[in-house]
Image (tube, helix red, strand yellow):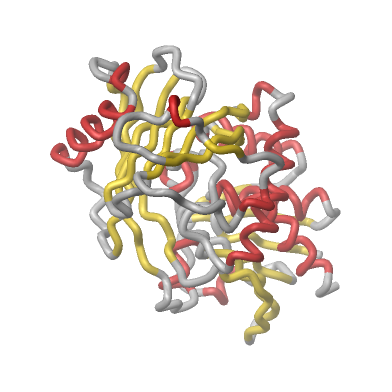
């Protein structure tokens, strides 16, 4: 079938790639690509953050885990397996997404930083999006999938010359399909030069002022914030200083790290991920958006389901 994917974040690109692999004639159109996408700002630590429903998210996350683990054999994909710890200030049960990972242990008491009483320890994929997004675009180019930039005024425009549209517009679905359930969740992050860190750290004690330290290849990403209904894309110097201080308390070696960049992105928050087929006046649409803070974590799993839904239309 002729399929047009709208959106060039990680969800759109993986969906287009999977559709091409399934034999469809796919193309991509997007208002923003590369550094202009929310995906480019992501810490891209595999973690089902702010994404629901739980059963579906666990399944999609497990698939993505397996795919990303397989990509570690290709250095050009920008994927590494990193061991790390999520830390808690009170005793905490296993996470609801436990079945998505092959192993999950508890942090031994002597390895808990001061002030923490519990923690998970596990190995998960970490994706360097500055590498992985261009890698995905290269895979699409090799598969004959063209990508063009352009902002659609409405969904009807997307149907020109194709049989099916796949809507991967993230927060843009508020306007494209008038979805009022989407909520922007502002995230500000800092990129510092790598200083030999191999372990990631996460603390969600304060749900709005998160602490995460994610080592990639040549850089380490620090975060962050989760500010609902805040669409300000400007970097706030006070927030930068606050993130550095919070992260340095957890990882003291960060003090004096070389700051390379400061960035802001808007997560597409939604009560549940929308992944379903809808038939509109111009034809069938497969919607795939509302991944919250887990776009990378759900991407390849959702792409599989997108391809299955498109196959069901033929």
Residue 34, position as x, y percentages in the image: 48, 40
* Residue at left offset 68%, top offset 38%: 68
Q: Is residue 12 visible?
A: no
Residue 225 vs 309, above or below: the answer is above
Q: Is residue 237 left or right of residue 203?
A: left
Q: Quadrant of residue 203?
A: top left
Looking at the image, the residue that sits furthest to the left is 238
- Looking at the image, which is closer to me, 29 or 17? 17
- Looking at the image, which is closer to me, 196 or 232? 196
- Looking at the image, which is closer to me, 66 or 131? 66
Q: Quadrant of residue 266?
A: bottom left
* Residue at left offset 27%, top offset 26%: 248
* Residue at left offset 46%, top offset 59%: 50
Residue 217, position as x, y percentages in the image: 51, 20
Quick one: quadrant of the N terminus?
Answer: bottom right
Residue 196, position as x, y percentages in the image: 44, 12
- Looking at the image, which is closer to me, 53 or 84? 84
């Amino acid at each position: 079938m002729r399929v047009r994917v709208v959106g060039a974040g990680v969800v759109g690109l993986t969906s287009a790639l999977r559709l091409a692999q399934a034999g469809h004639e796919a193309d991509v159109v997007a208002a923003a690509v590369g550094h202009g996408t929310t995906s480019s700002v992501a810490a891209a630590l595999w973690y089902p953050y702010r994404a629901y429903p739980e059963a579906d998210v666990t399944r999609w996350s497990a698939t993505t885990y397996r795919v990303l683990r397989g990509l570690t054999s290709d250095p050009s994909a920008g994927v590494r397996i990193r061991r790390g710890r999520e830390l808690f200030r009170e005793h905490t049960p296993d996470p609801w997404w436990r079945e998505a990972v092959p192993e999950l242990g508890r942090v031994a008491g002597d390895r808990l930083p001061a002030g923490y009483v519990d923690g998970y320890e596990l190995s998960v994929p970490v994706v360097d999006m500055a590498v992985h997004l261009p890698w995905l675009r290269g895979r699409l180019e090799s598969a004959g999938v063209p990508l063009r930039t352009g902002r659609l005024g409405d969904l009807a425009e997307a149907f020109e010359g194709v049989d099916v549209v796949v809507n991967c517009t993230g927060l843009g679905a508020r306007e494209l399909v008038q979805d009022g359930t989407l909520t922007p969740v502002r995230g500000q992050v800092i990129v510092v030069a790598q200083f030999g860190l191999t372990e990631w750290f996460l603390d969600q004690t304060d749900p709005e002022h998160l602490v995460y330290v994610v080592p990639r290849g040549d850089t380490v990403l620090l975060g962050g914030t989760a500010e609902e209904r805040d669409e300000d894309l400007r970097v706030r110097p006070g927030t930068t200083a606050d993130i550095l201080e919070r992260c340095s308390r957890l990882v003291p070696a960060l003090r004096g790290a070389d700051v390379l960049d400061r960035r802001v992105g808007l997560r597409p928050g939604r009560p549940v991920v929308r992944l379903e087929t809808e038939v509109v006046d111009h034809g069938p649409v497969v919607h795939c958006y509302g991944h919250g803070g887990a776009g990378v974590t759900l991407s390849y799993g959702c792409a599989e389901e997108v391809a299955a839904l498109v196959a069901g239309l033929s």
